[in-house]
Amino acid sequence: MRKILILPILLAVLSGCSSHKPRVALFLYNGEDLFMQSFADKIVAMAGMDIELSVFDAQNSQLLQNEHIENQIKEGCDLMLINPVDRLGAYSVIRRLKSENIPVIYFNREPLFKDLLLWEKTWYVGAKANQSGQMQAELVMELFGNDPGNLNRYDRNGDGRIQTVILKGEQGHQDAEIRTSEVVRSFRLMGFDLDILITEVANWDKDEAYEKMDDIIKTYGHDMELVLANNDAMALGAIRRMRQKGMFKDSNGNGRVDMDDDSWIPVLGIDGLEQAVQMIEEGYLYGTVINDSLSMARAMRDLSEAILNGRNIYDLPYRIEDNKYIWIDYQAFIKNH
């Protein structure tokens, strides 16, 4: 079990309002996930001085996360911030926290709405997965000329269709399923013909995507016109393998990798990782859809402060949908955008 005690801590409570220093527990589904690393860093960076925050890494084990939660209940936690390993595991956790009168804010992986309704002091902060798929598709459609009947030069074989590889986050995972289905639906809704060469599950992982791209390139390398990844980590892994296989060469001799090079293939991710933004600037990654963890962390801080101080959460500068949700919009990002 990895436990990190961080001081100063997440939230600022009015000084002098209590001699008790509120205890807040932050639970991550997997601390090795690049996006969650960045997200947790932002939460910690907003630390105040008057709250004790413990951070727990479940290492992608719901059983371990449940153990961490139970231990924090016994230690007298005042508020829990949970990024669940399994969204369906929220039912039993919420019932347990209700019995102990411990408020909980879920984030990044959305529990079922009916489970959120189990306990009035349960909320969710996150982004709508369908929006990310739509924005990813919009970036591609713009790149290919925004005219489904007259694709531009990025339709390399000139067949009027876009041959694509999809790197899927995790089979059965809500965000992976929605991001995948929504990006495909968006193309077809706008009249673009999309040929899916293969949908390969790489479990959100950069190294797994790198390994799986080897066979993908061997089988589909000559046909591939687009790589869509459910997150930036997999996109980065794909690019690494693609570079090793001779793609992204400066074939026009202008001293940089760019969209005019013969071996350039558009790759798109989702999340807005710092490493992904760097790859966009260097010309390898075409674009990403930013999952705005900074704004989410800020919303979690503000909501937590209101909860711990007994303030009206509806006075916060956020719309709280269905009394449960604070939604933060995705943002499309490409070079010089």
Image (tube, rainbow, N blue to C red):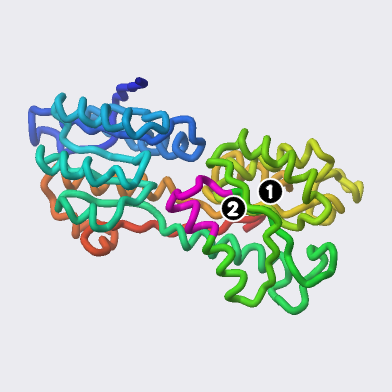
Q: Which residues are magenta?
A: 168-180
Residue 285 has which mark? 1
- Residue 16: within the magenta? no
Identity of the residue drawn at 41% across and 33% down: 60
Identity of the residue drawn at 29% across and 59% down: 318
Q: Is residue 26 visible?
A: yes
Identity of the residue drawn at 38% across and 47% down: 108
9 relative to 177 in the view: left or right: left
The amino acid sitting under disc 1 is: Leu
Identity of the residue drawn at 30% across and 40% down: 82
* Mark 1 and mark 2: Cα distance apart in space: 8 Å
CB under 8 Å between discs 1 and 2: yes
The amino acid sitting under disc 2 is: Thr
Residue that carries the numbered disc 2 in the rendered image = 288
Above or below, comparing residue 44 to residue 293 in the picture:
above
Above or below, comparing residue 69 to residue 236 in the picture:
above
Instruction: Locate residue 59, reporting x and y percent.
Output: 41, 29
Mark 2 crowdedness (10 Å alpha carbons): few <14, some 14-19, many ≥20: many
Pick the quarter of the image with the C terminus.
Answer: bottom right
Above or below, comparing residue 251 to residue 56 in the picture:
below
Residue farthest along the bottom direction in this orientation: 149
Instruction: Locate residue 315, reporting x and y percent.
Output: 19, 58
User: For residue 64, what is the image quadrant?
Assistant: top left
Mark 1 crowdedness (10 Å alpha carbons): few <14, some 14-19, many ≥20: many
